[in-house]
Amino acid sequence: MNRRTAAWLAWSLCTLSLALTALSLLLLDLNLSHPNTHIYDFWLDNTLNGMLFPVVGAIVASRRPENPVGWLLCLFGLAVAMRHFSAEYAIYTLLAQPDSLPAGEALAWISSWVWVLFVGFFVLFLLLFPTGELPSRRWRWLARITVAVVLVEMISSAFSTGPVDALGPIRNPLGIEGFSSVHEVIRSIIFPLLFALATLSVFMRLRRATGVERQQIKWFAYPAAVLVSGLIPGFITLLEEVDTPLWFEWVGFALYTAGGAAIPVCIGIAILTYRLYEIDIIINRTLVYGALTAMLVVVYLGGVATTQAIFRALTGQQEQPQLAVVVSTLVIAALFNPLRRRIQSFIDRRFYRSKYDAAKTLEAFSAKLRNDTDFDALNEDLVGVVRETMQPAHVSVWLRPPAGVGKDRRRGRTG
């Protein structure tokens, strides 16, 4: 496939995905106008994925048509858009305005199995990212099993009985007894196992990768870690023994949404190798300011609670004084810079040891440069510093002789 044909096909898939997403939002608005109608649970995720993944996939596939990652992104976005459109269409036709549009049950049936496609596309993406090839020949079995499981799950989902997932009371119109058990086993056991193995392949690839490929994997791993961190508050709220505040759930939701939206953008940056090495700065700042924020929140809450307890013990009043908030705020303002420097130093030593060692080496060389006048010794030290910090394949120093010496030498040669 030449580049022009690849670009035409990629942007056609993108346009189709965006059109289905736009129609889905229109149907969602119509469904929201009926207060007692079931709302599709995953409309926000499907909207973001149905727009971002196909756009990034079209850009990557049109520029790098030989890399299957771009095509997988296009197909993933198209499958998500199909699921969203079929779900919203079925809800509007069967629940909000019954029999107002044709083929409502057909779209409900499509919604029952089309989600399997984007699960399979994403597992294959994990196996092939970023080079478009498997980490090694030993991973071929996982790719083949993924394709086989996706085909089996599509059939079992298409003919499973009971309500269609996320469509409320709408049932599968072609449900057959016996398929539901296979569907539940694959969805609850085999699919999570495939995801775990595919994620393991990413870690194995990261462990062996160097240079550009390592930076590409970091660009994908960063938003994925943000997304997973957003899931943690959701799991905690499911525990009946734990009583979590509302803001805790909203923080998790915000992290999950931001991480999911950033994944396709970061994938595009990684594949197109655009400013790859800036991810190290982003990760470093995230670690520093994330830890700093957590520590300051603990200090603030602890300061407020302590001041309130002392005030209650001295005065017997239960109302929280404004002094507690003022004192805690002043303590945070005083601790901000010292804590930030200590956390930055700890993270550099723990996670960026080579950068930390290089900075220390340059600092020591600068101190010696101010005091040493032996040019031969400085020459050797400069070569050693460059070799240690930048690790080039070859390094040498050329010193231009003074003007007078060169003129005398030239005069001697010509005379």
Image (cartoon, helix red, strand yellow):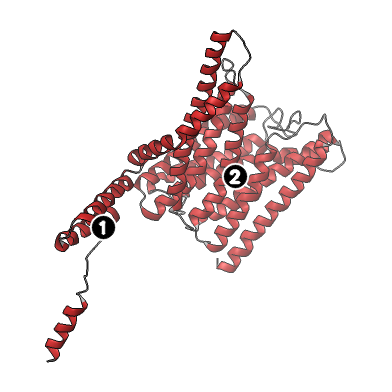
Question: What SS does tag 2 mark?
Answer: helix
**What residue does disc 1 label?**
386
Residue depicted at x 20% and y 55%: 371
- Amino acid carrying label 1: it is Val
Q: Position of residue 57 (x, y in %)?
A: 58, 54
Q: Position of residue 124 (x, y in %)?
A: 51, 46
Residue depicted at x 56% and y 41%: 259
Q: Is residue 316 left or right of residue 24?
A: left
Alpha carbons under labels 2 and 1: distance apart: 41 Å
Q: Residues within 10 Å of mark 1 (few under 14, many from 20)?
A: some
- Amino acid carrying label 2: it is Ala
- 2 or 1: tag closer to the N-terminus: 2
Towards the viewer: 271 or 328: 328
Residue depicted at x 42% and y 48%: 280
The label nearer to you, 2 versus 1, is 1
Q: Quadrant of the C terminus?
A: bottom left
Quarter of the image where one finds residue 33:
top right
Quarter of the image where one finds residue 118:
top right
Q: Residues within 10 Å of mark 2 (few under 14, many from 20)?
A: some
Q: Position of residue 293 (x, y in %)?
A: 50, 33
- Residue extending farthest to the bottom is 415
* On screen, residue 398 above or below 305: below
Q: Is residue 349 left or right of residue 314?
A: left
Can see residue 53? yes
Q: Is residue 319 left or right of residue 368?
A: right
Quarter of the image where one finds residue 284:
top left
Question: What SS does tag 1 mark?
Answer: helix
Q: Position of residue 113 (x, y in %)?
A: 66, 39
- Name the disc covering residue 261, or none: 2
